[in-house]
Each structure stands twice: as C-alpha cells, then as structure tokens.
Image (tube, rainbow, N blue to C red):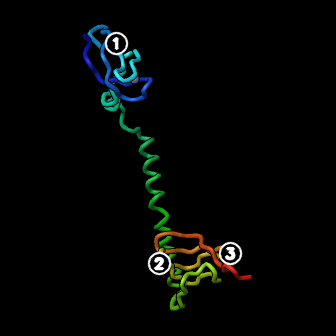
Amino acid sequence: MGDETDSICPRCKEETIHRVVAMKEKKIYLVICTRCNSQHRYRPSLATITRKVPLPSERQAKVLKKVESARTFRPQVSLKEWQALKEVAGEMETLPYDPGASYSEKQAVAHPTFGLGFVGKVIDKSKIEVVFEYEIKILVMNRPKPGQE
Ligand SMILES: [Zn+2]
C-alpha cells in the first residue's frame, strides 16, 4: 500500500500523481507514475522547486532594467524629434498619407493610424522615414497604382 504524491515524471515531462514505492531515510525515494506506470526516483513537485528558485541576481536585474529603458527610450526620441519637426514645419500644409504620392523632407503627413507625422528622411525613391508623435515608421511612397504604367 503506497501513498500518493505529486512528482515530476521524466516520461510524461510534467507533474503527475505518483505512488510511493520505496522510502529511504524517511524520505520518498522511488515512485511510480500513475499515468504512464514508469518507475523512477522521486522528484519534488514543481511547487517545491519554484520555491527554491533564487531571486534574480543583480546582473539579471540590471539587464531587465536595460530592456525596460530601451522600450521607453524610442518613443521619447520620436516625440522630441516630432516636436522639433513640427516647429520647422510651421504652417505648412499637411498632406494625407498616400503610398502612391511623393513626399519631400520635412513634409507634414497625416496618417490614418499614426496621426500627424513629418518626413524625417527620404530614404530612396520609394521609401520615407516618417516621425510620428510616438514612433518612427518607414513608409512607402511613389508606389505605382495598380493598372498604371
Ligand atoms: Zn508518467
């Protein structure tokens, strides 16, 4: 008559209910998985293991912080650049964004999703880098309309 215990089964690769087969020094030693019937050494359940996981080291914490700041860094750059471009653009007419149209640098563009943006850079004949309030996007321009030569 064996007791039942939660253990990690190497065959099922997850925590399953096991029957205790053998004890050693008052500790569970051998168990049988009630799901796949394989017998193996007792492995503490996940709950026991996670309790033993040490806190993230200082180095890991630093890396996490770096990742976090990288995430918030870009929009700030974008906003700063956006404000500067907005000043330069002044009273310039805002054109609706159209992939088939042509834009020059500093042109104010109204995008249906990203809002008001300014052409920060003309990359090539078909690509522009547009600075929006919260992000910088590479957009298409001069795209031939279907059926047009
Ligand atoms: Zn199993």
From mark 1 to mark 3, how far is it between C-alphas? Answer: 69 Å
Quadrant of the frame with the N terminus: top left
Q: Label 2: few (<14), some or many (≥20) within 10 Å?
A: few
Q: Which amino acid does label 1 sit on?
A: Tyr
From mark 2 to mark 3, how far is it between C-alphas? Answer: 21 Å
User: With 142 as the anchor, is 21 left or right in this view?
Assistant: left
SS assignment at label 1: strand
The reply to whether callout 1 and callout 3 are in contact (CB within 8 Å) is no
User: With 142 as the anchor, is 22 left or right in this view?
Assistant: left
How many discs appear? 3
In the image, residue 27 sits, relative to residue 104, either above or below, namely above
Going from the N terminus, do you reach mark 2 or mark 1 first? 1
Q: Residue 55 placed where, x, y %?
A: 36, 37
User: With 129 as the anchor, is 148 left or right in this view?
Assistant: right
Going from the N terminus, do you reach mark 2 or mark 3 first? 2
51 or 63, nearer to the observer: 51
Residue that badge 1 annotates: 29
Q: Which amino acid does label 2 sit on?
A: Gly
Q: Label 1: few (<14), some or many (≥20) within 10 Å?
A: some
Residue at 53 percent of width and 87 percent of height: 94
66 or 37, nearer to the observer: 37
Q: Residue 60 placed where, x, y %?
A: 44, 42
Residue that badge 3 annotates: 126
User: With 95 as the anchor, is 142 left or right in this view?
Assistant: right
Residue that badge 2 annotates: 115
Q: Label 3: few (<14), some or many (≥20) within 10 Å?
A: some
Residue at 66 percent of width and 80 percent of height: 145
Q: Which amino acid does label 3 sit on?
A: Ser
Residue at 50 percent of width and 70 percent of height: 78
Q: Give the quadrant of residue 34.
A: top left
Q: Is residue 80 visible?
A: yes
